[in-house]
Amino acid sequence: MPGKRATQYVWTVKEGRPALEARADQSASMMRKRLEVAPADLGSVSFSWWVQDVLAGADLGTAGLGDAPARVLFAFSGDHARLTPRTRMMFDLAETLSGERPPFATLMYVFGHEGASPDQLFVHPRTDRVRKIVLDVGPEQTRRWRMHRRDLAADFRRAFGEEPGMLVSVAVMTDADNTQQGARAWYGPIEFTP
């Protein structure tokens, strides 16, 4: 991510499970895999994470505080002509800075900040093309594997109020740049079921 320190990702084993370890040190970056899944083929997705600690002072709904120790992101294509002029301008700037145009829509599942509620939906404070669904919250959900299974198309419809386009990538992200902290998480395999 332009202008950000990179979170470190390394393949390892956590409590007997193969995992991708993420270490953020006042950093923000993601590990992403490109793919193509047609909307008709979207089914459920299963994934897991193991979060070491919550991030004090983080707030997913506030610009400049939106860190999360664990996120799993799903990016979708769509008709960019339908975007607002402001969003198109932001996407143009992002493409200039990164060399890549942002996806039409991004749905992310997050380990939420204290005060958030499970299944709470947040719209990203800087763009309405990113929506976040909180899955786990609080220290009682840390330091153990948390398993999740979600219906991607249903969650997309709930978050965006429309049908999803082609699923074009999946990513994990651990970030602590805004709150200037450290974060550590492990991600298990992400598995799709038609």
Image (cartoon, grey):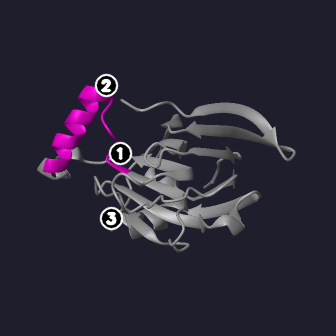
Q: Report the residue marked by disc 2.
A: 99
For image coordinates 43% across by 60% down, the residue present is 60
Q: Tell me if 125 is positioned left or right of 189 in this view.
A: left
- The Cα atoms of the two marked residues, 2 and 1, are separated by 17 Å
* Residue drawn at (66%, 55%) of the image: 53
Q: Report the residue marked by disc 3.
A: 162
Distance between the alpha carbons at the discs numbered 1 and 3: 13 Å
Between disc 3 and disc 2, whose residue precedes?
Answer: 2
How many neighbours does mark 1 have within 10 angstroms: few (below 14), some (14-19), or many (20 or more)?
A: some
**Real-space Cα distance between discs 3 and 2?**
28 Å
Residue indicated by mark 1: 77
Identify the mark nearer the N-term, 1 or 3.
Answer: 1
Q: Position of residue 56 (x, y in %)?
A: 54, 59
Q: Nearer the viewer, residue 30 or 163?
A: 30
Quarter that holds the N terminus:
top left
Kindly check if marks 2 and 1 are in contact, taking CB atoms under 8 A apart as contact. Answer: no
> Label 3 sits on what residue type?
Glu
Image quadrant in which you'd find residue 150: bottom right
Q: 79 above or below 128?
A: above
Callout 3 secondary element:
loop
Which span is picked out in magenta? Answer: 86-105
The structure residue drawn at horizontal position 52% and vertical position 53%, both measured from the top left corner, is 68
Q: Is residue 149 above or below residue 78?
A: below
Task: Please name the amino acid that badge 2 sits on.
Answer: Gly
- Give the number of the disc on residue 148: none
Q: Amino acid at mark 1?
A: Ser
Specify whether 36 is left or right of 105.
right
Residue 66 percent coordinates (x, y): 42, 54
Name the secondary structure under disc 2: loop
For discs 2 and 1, the disc positioned in front in the rendered view:
2
